[in-house]
Amino acid sequence: MAGSIGKQDIVSRVAQHAGIPNKQAEKVVNAFLDTVTMAMEHGEEVKLTGFGTFKVVERAPRKGRHPRTGEEMDIPGGARPTFTPGSRMVDATKKMGGGMARKAA
């Protein structure tokens, strides 16, 4: 399995791919991340055809167990961010043998 890349790696790759300086690529990456975050804060879905969909889902409150004591406890509900991969993303991982299953929305 391949390693992971961080934000600076993405910035460098965007800069190289687009033929722009790293500083400019960093502004683009930051603007993208801020835009997705703000849209999700407002309850909007962010759909990037072929790549995937970012959205916020409401989780219902539920019962759980305290890991140490085994005592039943209430787990509060709330909003959670989710990502569902698009067809290009799924196909790309299948090619590398990962066979990433598509998450049910």
Image (cartoon, rainbow, N blue to C red):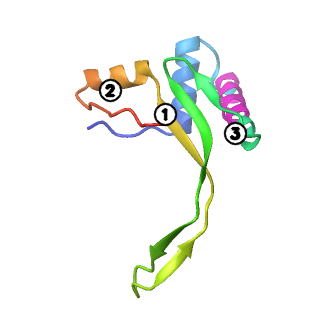
Closer-to-camera residue (7/90)? 90
- Marks 2 and 3, how far apart in space? 26 Å
Q: Amino acid at mark 1?
A: Thr
- Residue occupied by mark 3: 40
Secondary structure under badge 3? helix
Q: Amino acid at mark 2?
A: Thr
- Residue occupied by mark 1: 84
The x and y percentages for residue 60 are: 58, 58
Q: Quadrant of residue 66?
A: bottom left
Report the magenta stretch's main SS: helix
- Residue occupied by mark 2: 93
The x and y percentages for residue 19 are: 59, 11
Identify whether 24 is placed above or below 58.
above
- Marks 1 and 3, how far apart in space? 14 Å
Q: Which residues are magenta?
A: 24-37
Closer-to-camera residue (46/32)? 46
The x and y percentages for residue 74 are: 55, 75
How many residues crowd around disc 3 within 10 Å: few (fewer than 14), some, or many (20 or more)?
A: some
| Residue 14 is covered by the magenta coloring | no
